[in-house]
Image (cartoon, helix red, strand yellow):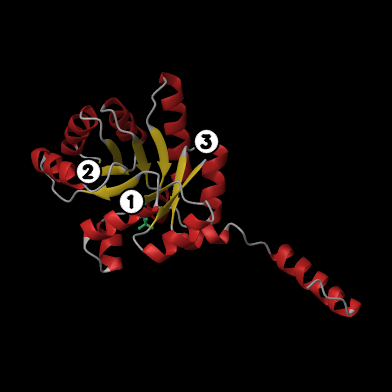
Amino acid sequence: MKFFVDTAEIDQIAELNDLGMVDGVTTNPSLILKSGRDILEVTKEICDLVDGPVSAEVVATEADKMIAEGRHLAEVAPNIAVKLPLTWNGLKACKVLTGEGKMVNVTLCFSANQALLAAKAGATFISPFIGRLDDINLDGMDLIADIRQIYDNYGFETEILAASIRSVNHVLDSARIGADVITAPPAVIKKLAEHPLTDKGLEMFLADWAKTGQKIL
Ligand code: G3P
């Protein structure tokens, strides 16, 4: 499973990237706002840092304008994945941009039928939003499972990029179901390392070590 980090904060991306935890990055207009940075500048910095796909989202809603914005974003670096919303116009733009050889991440996917359309339009990635479905008392994981089954039934190569991940259980369940990629905030990725028994065990080992009176260095 590939790990993308869902942020435009350079320091946080760099910390995880140094550990080999970053296979790609996803951004969106809200994350650009949060960073306080210029979209083209910060996207370029991220692309220079990370080898894998870096998603940068268009904000136009008409197909022609989406295509123009997508082409402009793709000029930032070869590893840009143009992020397009799952609207009819977004699908039109997806078809054109993937036809030009650009990577496309179709975002704001909330149904398996939407994911089917994105695959048929040639999307490189489909981003089903788990947390936002959970927020309205639906089960985001059911959507990941449905898309996995449908893509496998027909051999679609579009990668399932589980997004809107809010918890370590979202990561675990996505891995169990077989999502190709998860994108998560840095805090969720770091939380994967935590376990109370690890903390408790370490505390006991250190207490016993102190009683030996020894030093390693
Ligand atoms: O990857 C999509 C993500 O940025 C949305 O997450 O938590 O705002 O639903 P959230």
Q: CA distance from mark 1 to mark 2?
A: 11 Å
Of mark 3 and mark 2, the one earlier in the sequence is 2
Residue identified by numbered label 3:
178
Amino acid at the residue labelled 2 = Ala
Residue bearing mark 1: 47
Say if 120 sits above or below 7 in the image: above
Q: CA distance from mark 3 to mark 2?
A: 29 Å
Marks 3 and 1 sit apart, C-alpha to C-alpha, by 27 Å
For the residue pair 111 and 167, the one nearer the viewer reads as 167
Q: Secondary structure at mark 3?
A: loop
Question: Looking at mark 3, is its residue's CB closer than 8 Å to ligand 1?
Answer: no
Q: Amino acid at mark 3?
A: Gly
Badge 1 marks a residue whose secondary structure is helix
The residue under the point 42% across, 54% down is 5
Residue 93 visible in this rendered orientation of the protein: yes
Q: Earlier in the sequence, mark 3 or mark 1?
A: 1
